[in-house]
Image: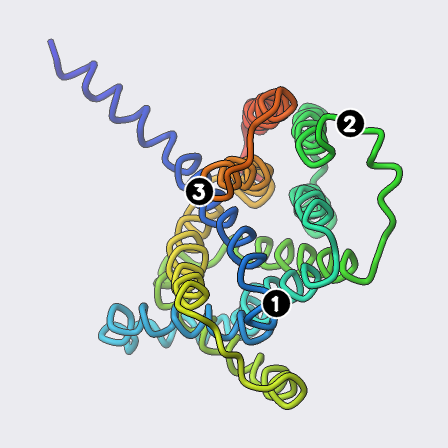
Amino acid sequence: MLATPVSSSARGVASLRPQLLLIFAALCWAGNFVLARGVSAQIPPVSLAVGRWTVAAVLLAPLVLPRMAESLAPMLAMRGRLLGLALLGIATSNTFVYIGLQTTAATHGVLLNALMPIMVALLAAIIWRKPLKAGVWAGMGVSVVGVMLIVTHGQPAQFATMDASLGDLWVIAGMLCWAGYTILLRNVAPQVDKLALLWVTIVIGLLMLTPAWLAELALRGLPRPDGRALAGVLYLGVFPSVLALIAYMRAVAEIGAARAAAFLHLIPAFGTLMAVAFLGERLALYHYVGLAAILGGLVWTQQASRYRSL
C-alpha cells in the first residue's frame, strides 16, 4: 500500500532534478559576478580568468585522469565541437564579461546578462529551424520585466537613459559566446564522459587564453592579490567553474538549451540577495516584486515548453 506513494514521490523528485541543478548553477554564477567585481581592483580580467580555470583544472585532474584513456576516443570523434566548447565556454565568455565589468556599471552587466536566454532561444530556433511557442516568449518577457525592476531600482523608465559603452559591448560579446556554448552542449553523445569533457575543454581553453594573458602581464605586470582576493579566485575555480558547469551540462542534456537558459534569469535575483547578505544592502519592495516576476516567468516558460526539441 505504501509502495505507490513512495514511487510517485521519487518520480516527482527525479522530474525536478534538471530544475534544481539549474537553480544551483544560477546561484553559483551569481557569486561569480559579485566576486569578480570585488577583486577587479587587484586582479585584471584575463589573469582572473586564468586563475579561475587553473584552479578548476587542478581540482578536476585527480578525478578525470584515471579514466581519461577510455574517454579519448569519443572526444576525438567530436574534436570540432570540443574546440568550440573550449573557445566559447572557457576562453572567451567569462573573460569578455570580466573585461566589460572593468568599465561598465554593474547594473548594465546584470541587465545584459538577462538578455542571454533570448540569445540562446534565437540561436536554437535559427540553427534547428524550430520556432518557439508563444507561451515561451511570454514567460521570458515576464522574467525580463522582473530583471528590469531589480536593476533599475523599481523605475523601469531609467532603462531608456542607459547609454551603451565599450564595456557593455564586451559583456554582450560574452553573453553571445555563452549562448553558443549552450547550443553546442546540446546533443553531445551520451557515451562522452561529461567530467572528462569539462576538464579537456578547460585545458584547451587555458591554452587559448595564454597569449592574451602574457600580453596582459606585459602591459600591467604580475597581480599581487591579498588573501581575500585569493579566496575569491578559489571560489571562482570551484563553484562557478566546476560544480555549476557540471550541473548546467547535465540539465541542458535533459531539458534542452532554451529551457535551461531561462533559469539564467535567476542570476540577477540571486546576486541581489548576495549583496544583501555580504555587502549589507537592504531589500526594497521592487526587489520582492522583481523576484516574483522572475520566478513567475520561469514557471510560465517551463509550462509552455513541454517538448524537448530545443
Q: Work out which quarter of the rendered image holds the C terminus and state it.
A: top right
Q: Residues within 10 Å of mark 1 (few under 14, many from 20)?
A: many
Residue at x 52% of width, y 56% of height? 185
Which residue is labeled 1 in the image? 95
* Position of 126 relative to 46 (above/below): above
Vertical side of 171 occupied by 86: above or below: below
Residue 46, how many percent across, how many down?
59, 74
Q: Position of residue 209 (x, y in %)?
A: 58, 79
Report the quarter where the N terminus lies.
top left
In the image, which disc is placed on residue 74?
none
Residue extending furthest top?
1
In space, the residues marked 3 and 1 are separated at their CA atoms by 28 Å
Residue 310 shows in the view: no
As measured in the structure, the alpha-carbon distance from the residue carrying label 2 to the one carrying label 1 is 31 Å
Q: Nearer the viewer, residue 274 or 5?
A: 274
Judged by depth in the image, the label closer to the viewer, 2 or 1, is 2
- Depth check: give the residue in front, 221 or 22: 221
Image depth: mark 3 or mark 1 in front: 1
Q: Which residue is mark 2?
A: 155
Q: Nearer the N terminus, badge 2 or badge 3?
A: 2
Which amino acid lies under the numbered mark 3 shown in the image of this protein?
A: Glu
Q: What label sits on residue 254 in the rendered view?
A: 3
Q: Nearer the viewer, residue 302 or 131?
A: 302
Amino acid bearing label 1: Thr
Report helix, strand or loop for mark 2.
loop
Q: Could you tell whether 10 is left or right of 149 in the image?
A: left
